Amino acid sequence: MSVPLSQMLTVTTYVLGQRLRGRRRYPLVLMLEPLYRCNLACAGCGKIQYPAHILRKNLSVEQCLAAVEECGVPMVSIPGGEPLMYPDIGRLVKELVARRKYVYLCTNAILLKEKLEAGIFTPSKYLSFSVHLDGLREEHDETVCREGVYDQAVEAIREALRRGFRVTTNSTLFDGTSAIRMQMFFDEMMDLGVEGMMLSPGYSYAKAPDQEHFLRRQKTHELFSKMLENPKKRWKFNQSPLFLQFLMGKWDFECTPWGMPAYNIFGWQRPCYLLQEGYAASFKDLMEKTAWENYGHKSGNEKCKDCMVHCGYEATAVDFTFASFKGLKAAAQATLTGKL
Amino acid sequence: MTVQPEANLEGWNPEVGDATALAEVIERAFDYRGDVTIVRRDGSEIVGYLFNRDATVAQPFVQVFEQQGGLPLTVLYADIHTVRFTGRDTAAGNSYAAWLRSREAAKAARSAPDV
């Protein structure tokens, strides 16, 4: 695994602190969406289908920082929309880094080279560009519904690495994904020099244009098992090894919908990053007034039945690591040996 | 009240008869990815995106971003006569189907023999 030691220590201290305080429910990563605007319209995305006046809205930097402060997380992921279209992205990242938050700026990288050349970001151990790449050129350009995006992203990754930035990739996998082609993709990303890769099956957003290609549980197990059965030592994943093992069917985890809460122009999204069942005015309200028992695989909720997405289950994997000797041993073993 | 099928709410102008029906219309409006027109009991109208509602509190309310901009407005259920689905449903588009069609057309053009 490729998470830097300082980040690992920060997360470990934070999780142990929460557990020592007896907190059963705590957030790990804030999914901060300062805007819904995007320069792509991907087939599997259900995030950007809004009227134009909503797409023009931005959170202020102050609203973003207040949300980070309110939930107290050590890590902030900035998806969207496309965060590089957010007018104050440079100032937002600078402020978060100053607060020693580990920031994953999730971008399709179309604008990355331009922003790097404009000098709005400074390399830091706290900042990582998490570039969206759903596979090799053909597969990626198909999922983002535009040709040439893969090449643009690869060029931007090279430029970011050349300038000393941390770069990871995030890949959403759909039905029909070839395990062999993904393995070739892992090789290509390692050749490029990215720090690590993040993988997740896609979620079947009710509003996404393509409803036919979301993975169901059994197919997810099969795909991830095939893809990661004998991982090459050089493949680095920037995520919990237990989460990857869960995707392979080796663990039976339950969802932690509060683990990666989402804050956006509408407020605190209830109950999670993927489902939009309402908005809370405060993080406290979200945590205390959400009927959490209605969500997760075992709840029987139809919308949660096939979901195995990182925002629900990665926090579970991290918590499990520190909750038992079994979890700690399995995580340590996978980290040290590279075997999943 | 006849509730329209999910995929066909654009242009829907429901006649609301009682409180239960209003709650159902509001639920549909919350799920709708287009602007709506909220018709108040006093006859005034608000055009915008209804992004939140809470029917579980003592005074149930909706929250709306007006089309003309500004901070969100809160409107009580008790003040609402009906909600009309006046804006385009942005989730009903066929962008993926259009992409597939254009990609297939491009592939076919590439593989067509030169004349």
Image (tube, rainbow, N blue to C red):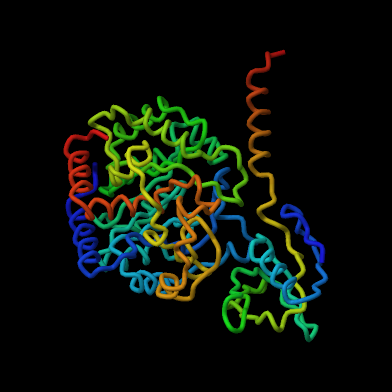
Q: Nearer the viewer, residue A69 or A35?
A: A69
Residue drawn where x is 73% and y is 79% of the image = B80
Tell which residue pokes out farthest to the bottom in this image. Answer: B42
Above or below: residue A266 compared with residue A334: below
Query: Residue at horizontal 45%, vertical 54%?
Result: A296
Q: Quadrant of residue A210?
A: top right
User: Quadrant where the C terminus of chain B lies?
Assistant: top right
Q: Residue A84, can we see it? A: no
* Image vertical order of residue A266 relative to residue A31, above or below: below
Q: Is residue A336 above or below residue A293?
A: above
Q: Is A40 left, or right, of A33 in this rendering?
A: right
Picture quarter containing residue B112? top right
Q: Residue B85: x percent and y percent?
A: 75, 65
Using the image, determine if residue A141 lies above or below residue A268: above
Residue at 47%, 39% (x, y): give it: A217
Can you give x and y, in whole percent of width and height, for residue A85 in the image?
48, 57
Residue A301 picture location, percent across and down: 53, 54
Is residue B57 toward the left or the right of residue A332 in the image? right
The residue lying at 45 percent from left, 63 percent from top is: A292
Quarter of the figure with the N terminus of chain B: bottom right
